[in-house]
Image (cartoon, rainbow, N blue to C red):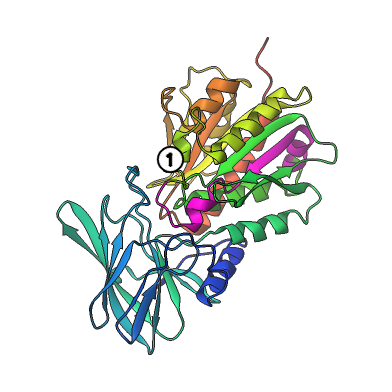
């Protein structure tokens, strides 16, 4: 197995969450019915937060089939999430077929072990098979008496965010409050980063609208931590800007192992405008609350996601923003800080598509962007990218001025 390099200090919290699940603790929050099967020696189950498969079947001794299906019939995006737990009575290997109802195999398997974090499953243990028009996968999985989780990505669950926020709020510059509740009653937290006298200009960051998009979450963690450092750049930034962070907007989807949606059968990043879901209404109300405050001014909105490659979705260059010129300045500085890395930028604007980037710009006129990290981007590189993006953002915002009235 090839280790996942440096899963970042905060992922110690994520690993701790997974370890508690592996030991059987804190599994009662899984909303879906538990699925399990056993051949008498080896067992597969989904009795932990973040599990993802529809059915388990025993095909033979040491041979299992998992049906991988989206959470509802409305899911069209191919983020085919899977996560299961494997346990054996002795050291051995088992075969696990992942049979997809739609979309096909996307995420390269990772293994979570208590006390050891996450590793990528050896590529030689993954056989891709075409069944009809779907790309299914056959995995050769090591088992022993220590349960391990196999998942499309590392599990970055609400408990991990909770530990991370606790760590950050030990710093007097960071405070934490509940923004509101998800549809299933889970807390959605807001982190505020501000100087002793909070600055009126506001930067808003949001993450994990889509459950499997863990790499975007890792980049956001690095980005936010950079804002709290004590160098001259971060101090100058905090003196002028207050940052509002909503790192986990879709805790229900994450805990329930969804591909794309929360629990209302709606993609949250297609609900900015309709606002049919409690999670997006919380974001709308927060942003409109900033606008209504005579002592506050929204200046920037960034949304963190994952896709198959690293990219930044921006507004069209000709679109006016207040402050003007932020996006090209940010991107140029970002690229300059990463001379050995190709910064990919994809401008666009679809006002009829109710995504956060379009709605926030159209409603408030501020610069907006969707910051995407590749599914399999090296984890050490993700941390470097997140920090560079934060540094470039701080520098560009400090250089920005309001558009003329």
Q: Which element is circle 1 on?
A: loop
Identify the image quadrant of residue 121: bottom left
Task: Report if residue 115 is visible in the image.
Answer: yes
Q: Which residues are magenta?
A: 233-260
Task: Report if residue 336 is visible in the image.
Answer: no
* Residue identifier under label 1: 266
Residue in the image at 62% along x and 30% along y: 300
| Magenta region includes residue 289 | no
Q: Position of residue 13 (x, y in %)?
A: 61, 64
The N terminus - image quarter: bottom left
| Magenta region includes residue 251 | yes
Q: Position of residue 82 (x, y in %)?
A: 37, 61
As drawn, the residue found furthest toward the left would be: 132
Q: Pick whichever, 387 or 71, lies toward us.
A: 71
As drawn, the residue found furthest toward the right would be: 197
Identify the image quadrant of residue 96: bottom left
Q: Position of residue 129 (x, y in %)?
A: 19, 62
């Amino acid at each position: 197995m090839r280790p996942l390099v440096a899963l970042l200090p905060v992922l110690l919290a994520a690993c701790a969450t997974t370890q508690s699940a592996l030991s059987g603790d804190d599994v009662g929050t899984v909303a879906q019915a538990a699925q399990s099967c056993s051949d008498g020696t080896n067992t597969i189950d989904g009795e932990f937060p973040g599990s993802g498969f529809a059915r388990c079947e025993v095909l033979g001794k040491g041979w299992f089939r998992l049906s991988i299906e989206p959470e509802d019939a409305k899911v069209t995006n191919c983020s085919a999430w899977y996560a299961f737990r494997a346990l054996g009575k002795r050291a051995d290997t088992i075969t696990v077929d992942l049979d997809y109802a739609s979309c096909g195999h996307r995420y390269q398997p990772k293994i979570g072990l208590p006390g050891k974090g996450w590793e990528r499953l050896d590529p030689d243990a993954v056989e891709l098979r075409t069944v009809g028009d779907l790309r299914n996968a056959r995995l050769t999985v090591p088992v022993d008496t220590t349960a391990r989780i196999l998942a499309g990505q590392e599990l970055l669950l609400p408990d991990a965010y909770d530990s991370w926020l606790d760590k950050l709020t030990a710093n007097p510059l960071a405070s934490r409050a509940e923004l509101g509740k998800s549809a299933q009653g889970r807390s959605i937290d807001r982190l505020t980063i501000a100087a002793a006298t909070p600055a009126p200009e506001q930067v808003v960051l949001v993450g994990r609208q889509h459950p499997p998009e863990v790499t975007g979450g890792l980049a956001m963690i690095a980005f936010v931590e950079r804002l709290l450092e004590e160098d001259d750049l971060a101090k100058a930034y905090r003196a002028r800007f207050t940052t509002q962070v909503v790192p986990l907007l879709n805790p229900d989807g994450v805990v329930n192992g969804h591909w794309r949606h929360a629990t209302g059968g709606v993609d949250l990043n297609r609900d900015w405008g309709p606002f049919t879901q409690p999670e997006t209404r919380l974001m709308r109300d927060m942003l409109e609350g900033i606008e209504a405050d005579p002592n506050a001014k929204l200046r920037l909105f960034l949304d963190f996601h994952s896709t198959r490659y690293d990219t930044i979705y921006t507004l069209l260059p000709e679109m006016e923003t207040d402050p003007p010129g932020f996006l090209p300045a940010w991107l140029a500085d970002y690229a300059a800080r990463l001379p050995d890395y190709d910064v990919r930028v994809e401008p666009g604007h679809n006002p009829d598509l109710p995504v956060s980037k379009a709605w926030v710009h159209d409603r408030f006129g501020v610069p907006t962007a969707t910051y995407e990290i590749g599914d399999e981007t090296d984890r050490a590189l993700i941390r470097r990218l997140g920090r560079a993006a934060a540094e470039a953002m701080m520098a560009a915002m400090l250089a920005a001025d309001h558009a003329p009235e």
